[in-house]
Image: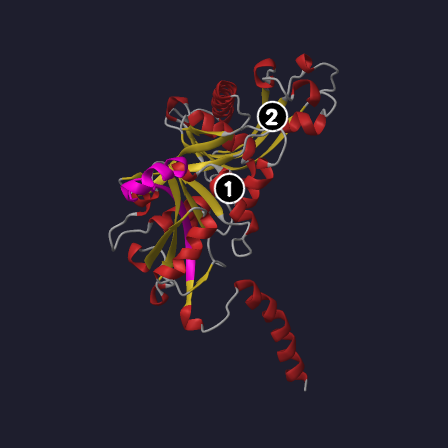
Amino acid sequence: MKNLRVLVAWCCMLLPLLAGCDLTGDLKDVEMVRALSVDIIDNVDILDSADKVEAQENSSMISAAVHLLHRDRALEGQYAESYYQLTAEGDSLAAALGQLYDVGAKQLNFSHTSLLVLGEQAAPTEFWLDYALRSPQLRPTVYPVVCVGQIEALLAADEQTLSPIYLLNNLSEPMGSSYPGVFGVSLQDFVEDFYQTGIAPALPLVEKTADGVAAAGLAVYAGDKIALLTDDDAVLAWQLLVRTPYLYGMVLALDDGVAVRLQGGQIFIRLQPVDRAEDLRPVCELELQADILNNPAGLDTQQVRALLNERLQQILAVGMAKSRRLQADFLGIGREIWRKQPHIWPQIAEQDYLSGITVDLQTEIELNAD
């Protein structure tokens, strides 16, 4: 009787998990979706000439592809040959996904989907965000990334090579840690910033390289436009101020051949109480822990700390300058003003406040010389 009660208790705990995975019907028909990619195709070129005039006002369609693991290769997700793909088109993402069943999909299961790959033309939120928020299948922990150019080239790989899906996963969650990396912006992270006052949300920008795929910068959602940001220091500024909790493992090259590896950090943006917007002077207090990786000149810890502080000041200056040029607050300075000086925010909300404020950086650096 005691064993029976234990068995019943285990069943009660497992049933919600099974429901969450949506494993209904015959299990042999279940196909595990590891990534969903969304792109734009020009449908004018594929229409008959009689239909082209009518199609000019709606000259693009959504192409949606699911990237699935072969059942017998489920534990070998690092190889390109472990995956197969189904693709369909529609006038919306939901419609395109619905068409997948007409091209051979069986029972698509999105419970283990980790990536939402957006082609450059499909990156505007009008093409994907509504579906992502409404879908009962996509988890808020899925990682959206924006691809330079079209996805077909990014995800193409020869058999026996590392899978681009695997490489993108590793970029989002380094070394299979199950924790987001500095480029691992989850759907939930993006949505929070998208609807938050005083910050322009950003997604990682990725591109095809000779070695597979790699980070190329940021796609910054600046109002109704998307700015592709590839300036290395501006991207570093975003990582330091917005992605501070996920800095583990980042390597910074300094002067005199010195290199340090960041082991973590905290950021706090402080504002003194003021009555006028022009008196605002945000102070970014950045705490970092780092290891010295390379020190060919044999500099002491204090000298290395000074070099690192100088580099951080340079990074912030570049990030702020880029933010002003884009008129997009991807560093989230306005968010802190809105949170901590709400009576000032109405004065600057409709202005180019980034050009009217000076941001200072104060650092506290803990260095390990071993």
Q: How is the image coloured?
A: secondary structure
Q: Tell which residue pokes out farthest to the bottom in this image.
A: 1
* Nearer to me, 123 or 239: 123
Q: Residue at x 42, y 39 (%)?
A: 122
> Quadrant of residue 10 in the image?
bottom right
Q: Where's the N terminus, which quadrant?
A: bottom right
Residue 298 is situated, as x and y percent measured from the top left of the image, at: 41, 26
Element at label 1: loop
**Seen in the image, is 223 located left or right of residue 81?**
right
Label 2 vs 1, first from the N-terminus: 1
Q: Is residue 40 magenta?
A: yes
| Dot 1 amino acid type | Val
| Dot 2 amino acid type | Ile
Task: Please name the residue that numbered disc 1 is placed on.
Answer: 185
Please say whether residue 176 is visible from this viewpoint.
Answer: no
The stretch in magenta equals 32-59
Q: Does 8 appear above or below 300? A: below
Element at label 2: helix
Task: Please name the residue that numbered disc 2 is placed on.
Answer: 333
Instruction: Bin the neighbour count of mark 1 within 10 Å (Cα to Cα): few under 14, some 14-19, many 20 and up.
Output: many
